Image (tube, grey):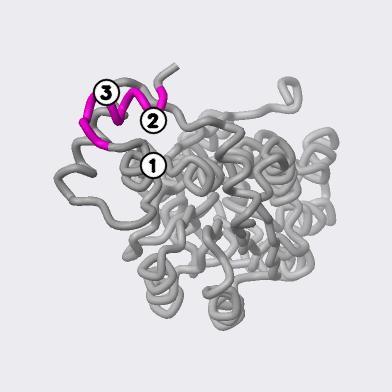
């Protein structure tokens, strides 16, 4: 096992100098510090876990999680992944604080960020695409906060990494799945959560791009439901009344159950084919009833676990992410392979 003492001997410095260079404590000549870090990397030096645990417990670093999980069952598995990742790191004394919200109100999300900015060392956020949010995230990064975007990304920030799926590919996949199930002719509607989210816009863009290959796919409407089942129910009922010709609906985000309830009020022979995202309990139930023909799975548990893992690795071990994006593959699920 490579030790600080061995690195000190090779670099011709004291063990204390190596400690300061590797842990950013005190002043070390820049050239000497660079030599020490390179030597440590070449030798594969790993800090003593017990020492790191003791240091972290003394500092009690805080990870704040800001997500729109209220009334959105998709985030149940995301949170489960986060909680189980945190449990594995209890020895390090890192604190996790959850800040949940309902829907996509940028003013509310901004208020949360402003409240916590001076009290956190890491932020995991499902960001709303708004100039004020971009500015605030960059402000926190400039203060030394480590930032991971989870499940939804945002442009214009210096966030350290994104953990989630490829939304554009999700839209393409949804359209291709619709073609596979219906053929090359359809009168369809697209329902998504909010155009305030970059991910939802990308799914819509991917769907429309893939639809260019299908001239007989007619798009009747694009609706936002704020990922809310009650609102989705009302808007879907209005949609189906105004456009009785619709024979297919692609729900690109949450609010799936509300849309299904509206579809179920139609006679069976007039119900549009419906495909969705995710495998929350109500979606599985609607697949069992035959209302939803297929859904696209985006690994919520793994997203949550990985996001917290990246924050812990940085706070405890000082390891920056190796990549800017950690992408989980979109997977098509039928009721038979759930």
Evaluate if marks 2 and 3 touch, with contact meaning CB atoms under 8 Å apart: no
Residue 213, relative to residue 190: is it above or below?
Answer: above
Q: Nearer the viewer, residue 309 or 197?
A: 309
Camera sees residue 186: no
Q: Position of residue 257 (x, y in %)?
A: 78, 53
Q: Find disc 2 in the rendering and name its residue.
A: 4
| Dominant secondary-structure state across the stretch colored magenta | helix
Q: Find disc 3 in the rendering and name its residue.
A: 42
Question: What residue is at 64 percent from the left and 68 percent from the top?
Answer: 226
Which region of the structure is painted magenta? 3-13
Camera sees residue 132: yes
Q: Earlier in the sequence, mark 2 or mark 3?
A: 2
Question: What residue is at 65 percent from the left and 70 percent from the top?
Answer: 103
80 on left or right of 103: right
Q: Nearer the viewer, mark 2 or mark 3?
A: 2
Q: In the rendered structure, find residue 19 and report the number of the disc placed on it.
A: 1
Residue 270, relative to residue 103: is it above or below?
Answer: above
Residue 103 sits inside the magenta stretch = no
């Amino acid at each position: 096992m490579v030790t600080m003492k061995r690195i000190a001997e090779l670099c011709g410095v004291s063990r204390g100098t190596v400690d300061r260079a590797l842990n950013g404590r005190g002043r070390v000549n820049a050239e000497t510090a660079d030599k020490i870090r390179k030597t440590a990397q070449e030798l594969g030096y790993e800090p003593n876990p017990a020492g790191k645990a003791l240091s972290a417990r003394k500092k009690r670093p805080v990870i704040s999680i800001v997500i729109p999980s209220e009334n959105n069952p998709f985030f149940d598995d995301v949170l489960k992944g986060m909680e189980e990742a945190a449990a594995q790191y209890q020895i390090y004394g890192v604190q996790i604080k959850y800040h949940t919200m309902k829907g996509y109100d940028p003013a509310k999300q901004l208020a949360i960020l402003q409240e916590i900015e001076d009290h956190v060392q890491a932020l995991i956020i499902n960001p709303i695409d708004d100039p004020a949010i971009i500015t605030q995230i960059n402000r926190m990064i400039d203060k030394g906060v480590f930032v991971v975007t989870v499940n939804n990304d945002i442009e214009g920030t210096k966030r350290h990494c994104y953990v989630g799926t490829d939304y554009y590919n999700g839209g393409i996949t949804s359209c291709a799945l619709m073609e596979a199930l219906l053929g090359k002719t359809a009168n369809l509607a697209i329902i998504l959560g909010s155009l305030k989210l970059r991910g939802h816009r990308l799914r819509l863009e991917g769907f429309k791009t893939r639809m260019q290959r299908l001239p007989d796919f007619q798009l009747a409407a694009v609706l936002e439901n704020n990922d809310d089942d009650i609102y989705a129910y009302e808007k879907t009922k209005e949609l189906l009344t105004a456009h009785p010709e619709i024979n297919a609906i692609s729900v690109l985000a949450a609010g799936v159950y509300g849309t299904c309830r509206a579809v179920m009020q139609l006679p069976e022979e007039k119900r549009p084919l419906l495909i969705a995202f995710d495998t929350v309990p109500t979606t599985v139930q609607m697949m069992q009833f035959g209302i939803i023909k297929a859904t696209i799975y985006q690994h919520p548990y793994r997203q949550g676990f990985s996001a917290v893992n990246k924050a812990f690795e940085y706070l405890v071990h000082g390891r920056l992410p190796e990549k800017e994006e950690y992408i989980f593959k979109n997977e098509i699920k039928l009721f038979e392979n759930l």
